[in-house]
Image (tube, helix red, strand yellow):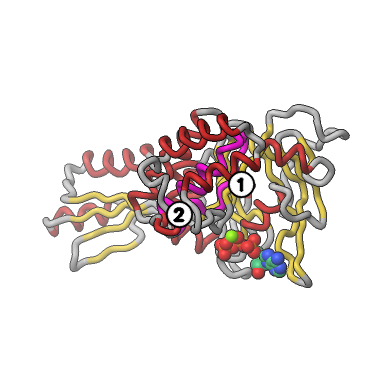
């Protein structure tokens, strides 16, 4: 698969760039298992980027390399203008990382966890208390602040995790599966938190298994599969490359059903349910053309539903078996 053209790094790795994160040809193997087989990324400052992929695809490995926790075997990456290999301290000073597995210490209270982070960031005692109190309040943890973190629910722990990440006021944050295991309400709360960060100008790099989440939050999405970026684009672009989008029309009048069936390009029909499936990308233009056609023949459908590819469709198409040709970046754009 041809790789996209990426800006090359400056020689010092310090030249300011509009990209908060960029990577070129990142490679990583564990033993004889190739985890990353040449990953290119470019994430503009102030945007949200989502890395999607099935279990074991290398999402966490990518986060670990970009946050200097592990080193790549090949390729290069700059984060906040610093090279991850030659200037890891510069990278670390600019980022916050909320790992896939909680960094919360359950034996101490939420507040003590926060103060520990403030100490790690060398904040003065009073400043540390101020920042901790402010973040606990913002993350709706003020009431639980004095309770041991082990008594927190999963959603509270995740919020505390992110609050701890924000103690050092990072400009770029990495969130590795921030909402896995959270109920729908907690997930929406977390989305609100992430949107708030973005509104403050923070660049967010998140990994997720949920297309819906990427859809809600991300400006750009990349799908990782087999060590490579299988596709990259906005949520809309990704959904559009997956076949299976259609409009379903249902009728109660058999005559209307038959007329519509003759007038439209039908992919599938159900004579018993009197329903027709018409291939469509769900765009306004295609919907209008279907409705105009029905109108011109005075055919009235009783129900119209638009089926756009969902998480399963996209995941299956992009991360399917190797003998299925996977869509590439080229046909996304
Ligand atoms: N320290 C390590 N030693 C050996 N193998 C590793 C190590 N870390 C990761 N791997 C392997 O690398 C591959 C990618 O793992 P990674 O954790 O990056 O995947 P992931 O996309 O984050 O998966 P998940 O969705 O399950 O979190 C897996 O096959 C994993 O077993
Ligand atoms: Mg992971």
Does 283 sit above or below residue 72? above
State which quadrant residue 284 falls in: top left
x and y, in percent, of residue 133 in the image: 46, 35
Q: Could you classify mark 1 by the number of other residues whose Cα lies within 10 Å: few (under 14), some (14-19), or many (20 or more)?
A: many
Q: Is residue 2 within the magenta segment? A: no
Taking the spot 52% from the left edge, 28% from the top edge, the residue there is 200
The residue most toward the left is 253
Q: Is residue 239 left or right of residue 10?
A: left
x and y, in percent, of residue 315 in the image: 50, 60
Q: Which residue is mark 2?
A: 149
Name the front one of labels 1 and 2: 2
Q: Is residue 67 left or right of residue 133?
A: right
Secondary element type, mark 1? strand
C-alpha gap between disc 1 and disc 2 = 19 Å
x and y, in percent, of residue 252 in the image: 12, 57
- Name the quarter where the N terminus is drawn: bottom right
Which of the two residues, 193 or 25, is positioned nearer the viewer here?
193
Report the magenta residues as a range.
Answer: 155-180
Q: Quadrant of ligand 2?
A: bottom right
Secondary element type, mark 2? helix
Q: Which residue is mark 1?
A: 97
The residue most toward the front is 125
Q: Earlier in the sequence, mark 1 or mark 2?
A: 1
């Amino acid at each position: 698969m041809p790789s996209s053209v990426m800006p090359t790094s400056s020689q010092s790795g310090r030249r300011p760039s509009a990209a908060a994160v960029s990577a070129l040809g990142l490679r990583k193997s564990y033993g004889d298992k190739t985890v990353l087989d040449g990953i290119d990324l470019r994430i503009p400052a102030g945007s949200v980027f989502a890395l999607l992929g099935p279990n074991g695809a290398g999402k966490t490995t990518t986060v670990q390399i970009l946050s200097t926790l592990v080193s790549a075997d090949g390729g290069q990456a700059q984060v906040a203008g610093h090279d991850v290999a030659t200037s890891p301290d510069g990278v670390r000073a600019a980022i916050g990382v909320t790992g896939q597995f909680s960094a919360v210490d359950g034996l101490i209270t939420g507040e003590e966890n926060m103060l520990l982070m403030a100490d790690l960031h060398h904040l003065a005692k009073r400043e540390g208390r101020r920042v901790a109190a402010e973040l606990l309040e913002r993350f709706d943890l003020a009431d639980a602040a004095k309770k041991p973190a082990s008594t927190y629910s999963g959603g509270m722990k995740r919020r505390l995790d992110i609050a701890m990440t924000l103690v050092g006021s990072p400009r770029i944050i990495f969130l590795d599966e921030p909402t896995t295991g959270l109920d729908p309400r907690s997930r929406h709360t977390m989305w609100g938190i992430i949107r708030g960060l973005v509104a403050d100008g923070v660049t967010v790099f998140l990994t997720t298994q949920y297309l819906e989440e990427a859809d809600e939050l991300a400006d750009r999405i990349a799908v990782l599969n087999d060590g490579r970026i299988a596709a990259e684009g906005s949520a809309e672009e990704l959904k559009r490359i997956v076949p299976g989008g259609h409009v379903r029309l249902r009728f109660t009048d058999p005559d209307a059903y038959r007329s519509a069936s003759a007038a439209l390009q039908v992919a599938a029909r159900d004579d018993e349910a009197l329903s027709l499936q018409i291939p469509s990308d769900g765009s306004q233009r295609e919907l209008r053309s279907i409705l105009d056609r029905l109108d011109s023949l005075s055919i009235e459908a009783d129900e119209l539903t638009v089926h756009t590819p969902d998480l399963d469709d996209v995941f299956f198409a992009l991360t399917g078996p190797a003998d299925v040709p996977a869509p590439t970046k080229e046909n996304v754009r």
